[in-house]
Image (spheres, grey):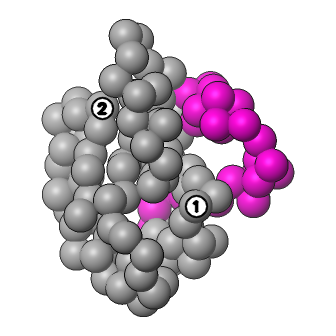
Amino acid sequence: MKFLVDNQLPTALARFLASRGVDCEHVLDVNLQDADDRVIWAYAGQTGAILISKDGDFLHMANAPNPAARLVWIRLGNCRTRMLLSVVGSAWLGIMAALLSGERVIEVR
């Protein structure tokens, strides 16, 4: 599985996942840092990436009929990067299990 981390999350998250063998990029890596949400969503769909974002707009896109991509929706409030990485790291096996079972949206709190 391939993942794309959205602008609202730090590049450190993409690097953290990549260091653990996950195929993961940040929107900065693919020059989409200034792109509209619809462009990012379309890119994720075209490349087969699962988007990781805090942006609720993507939830609506993921729940639309025939969504272009899937979403790991980070529901943490403002927190330090260390805390974000800890929460995602702890939840990663569950995230992967949900994705493998076909879930379109995985919520991480």
Say if residue 72 shows up in the picture.
yes
* Mark 2, secondary structure of its residue: loop
Q: Please report the residue visible at 40 percent of the width from the left and 11 percent of the height from the top.
A: 66
In the image: residue 84, left or right of residue 100: right
Q: Which residue is mark 1?
A: 8
Which residue occupies 77% across, 41% down? 35
Q: Which residues are magenta?
A: 21-46
Taking the spot 36% from the left edge, 85% from the top edge, the residue there is 83
Query: Residue tagged by mark 2?
Result: 104
Crowd tier of the residue under label 2, counting other residues whose Cα lies within 10 Å: few below 14, some 14–19, many 20 or above: some
Q: CA distance from mark 1 to mark 2?
A: 20 Å
At label 1, the amino acid type is: Gln
**Kind of residue indicated by mark 2:** Arg
Relative to 4, is 53 on the left or the right?
Answer: left
Q: Would residue 54 appear left or right of 91 to someone viewing this image? A: right
Measuring from the top left, give residue 68's x and y in whole percent: 50, 21
Rendered location of residue 41, percent (x, y): 59, 32
Q: Residue furthest top?
A: 65
Q: Is residue 6 above or below residue 76?
A: above
Residue 52 vertical position relative to residue 76 in the rendered view, above or below: above
Residue positioned 37% across, 70% down in the render: 77
Q: Is residue 85 visible?
A: no
Q: Which mark is residue 101?
A: none
Q: Which picture quadrant has residue 25? A: bottom right
Above or below, 46 relative to 108: above
Give the mark nearest the N terminus, 1 or 2. Answer: 1
